[in-house]
Image (cartoon, rainbow, N blue to C red):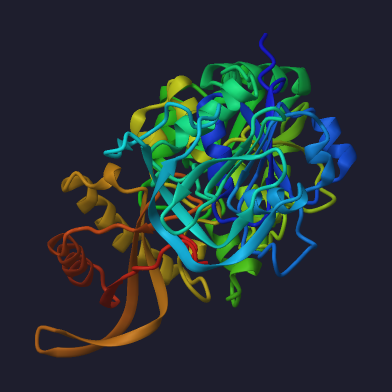
Amino acid sequence: MTDIHAQRILILDFGSQYTQLIGRRIRDIGVYCEIHPYNMADEKIKAFHPNGIILSGGPESVIETDKVRAPDMVFQLGCPVLGICYGLQTMAVQLGGQVAQGTNREFGYAQVKIKNRSPLLDGIEDHVAQDITPLMDVWMSHGDHVSVLPPQFTLIASSESCEIIGMADAKRHFYGLQFHPEVSHTRQGLRILERFVLDICGCKRVWTTQTVMEESIKKIQDKVGQDYVILGLSGGVDSSVVAALLHAAIGDQLVCVFVDTGLLRLNEAQEVQALFAKHMGIHLITVNAAERFFTALRGIVDPEEKRKIIGKLFVDIFEEESKKLKNAKWLAQGTIYPDVIESAGTGVGKARVIKSHHNVGGLPDNMNLKLLEPLRELFKDEVIKMGIELGLPYDSVYRHAFPGPGLAVRVLGEVKKEFVDTLRRADAILIEELHKNKLYYTVSQAFVVFLPVKSVGVLGDARHYDHVVAIRIVETVDFMTAHCARLPHEFLEKVSNRIINEVPGISRVVYDLSSKPPATIEWE
């Protein structure tokens, strides 16, 4: 079997909002990579055995601080190094060049000229100037700039505002770019990263959906042996793919526990039972625990506390079910890489807890079941591809993401049954209209949020004072960044009218225009 981790790229994170995008692009190329903090210890860097190293961008200024630097080991290993934005600047300073504050800051689109041939950019262009100079359309985000090249480096790209946009030391395989090749706005960005990873670093495309799936199945079989595995099946994409993967690996040793928390979408329980128990033949136990969850959440308004309460109650229920099963030793979860990142579980750079996920933040230290997380190192789109490969229905795999704590984190403030019931009906109307208007698969995620405020409205000739809900619809590539979907006003107006007219207790509907960052996709 091919070792899909044998060839690897190390990404050192200096705190850029685009660092995870770099990781996604390297995976898209077909090569394994890991993201670690910029101050990764020398011994860990050597133990990682990277085929190449990428230094990410970051919010710091090389001029203002000398503490945020790449380890010297990076330039001593003998493997290729690519510095991006801040990564370029710290490389330049550490290797004998200079960085200065720019008189013209560059944020957004820019056009760069290829000045000299290099293994990194040779033959990659978007346009050709009248003097036959190759040009590229790129995405910039910087104020400081490299003012003096380090010894042994040559200039490979410039822009009108900045002379040194790209530099190269082809002999040592060190390269630096001031622009961001990882973002889609840099048209040839993927080709540039392919050039670095495949040609300069010499990696092969062995990280594919099929090879990842095959290795995952082998690892599951080796780890589990003859034990039974319990999976908390929610019906969402992540847990559905885990269910299909475990079923392929260990068959009847898998027992799925579907917990009806009372916090699910409309008709969720029936749909899960139809797909997994009837269609796929997976052993499925359904536990009706709505009353337990509402009781546990009574009076709780803090979203972090909600998540931890829900996570603990999930584990309690799984452990109760496990005691009924002979040889049940493992608890499987649909934890994926973005869950770990947002819970500050990677230890990356300046990571802070944005929100804890019940998959990674609510597990007790004394849990009796061993944890099995076969998707932990995968991004969402990699999980989706695996789901298709495993034969899951398109509608199931491409269904919009749903938070593990369910509607509890879409009801802001205290979670009451009547609030959840109201929200569930409003959310179902939004999803129904998206399908009717063939918009559901054109957006990445859509849902309704119940707000803990009331507003005056008029129904017929009567004044009423009822709750407000917010519609959240976003478009994203990787769920690390997102922007609000620009849907027709007529569509939004129709959804609003239906919700107010058909769902008692709602007087007003608003639309969330926030991007991520600074907002998160979910409200809590």
Considering only vertical position in the picture, is 400 above or below 484? above
Q: Which residue is drawn at 65% across and 24% down?
A: 201
Q: Residue at x 80, y 51 (%)?
A: 39
User: Is 470 situated above or below 444?
Assistant: below
- Residue 61 horizontal/vertical position (percent): 66, 65
- Relative to 220, residue 315 above or below: below
Q: Position of residue 357 (x, y in %)?
A: 62, 55
Between residue 522 and residue 482, name the one nearer to us: 482
Residue 330: give x, y in percent of width and height: 74, 33
Q: Nearer the viewer, residue 173 or 342?
A: 173
Q: Is residue 241 visible?
A: no
The single residue placed furthest to the top in the displayed view is 1
The one of 25 and 90 positioned closer to us in this rendering: 90
Residue 256, horizontal then vertical, whole percent:
59, 33
Q: Nearer the viewer, residue 461 or 138?
A: 138
Q: Image point 39% across, 41% down: which residue? A: 270
Count of labels in the image: 0
Hey, which residue is sitting farthest right in the picture?
Answer: 43
Q: In this view, does 216 lie above or below 480?
A: above
Query: Which residue is depicted at the point 39% across and 68% down?
Result: 514
Q: For residue 41, which quarter of the picture? A: top right
Q: Is residue 133 visible?
A: yes
Decide if residue 57 is on the left or right side of residue 425.
Answer: right
Quadrant of the drawing holding the N terminus = top right
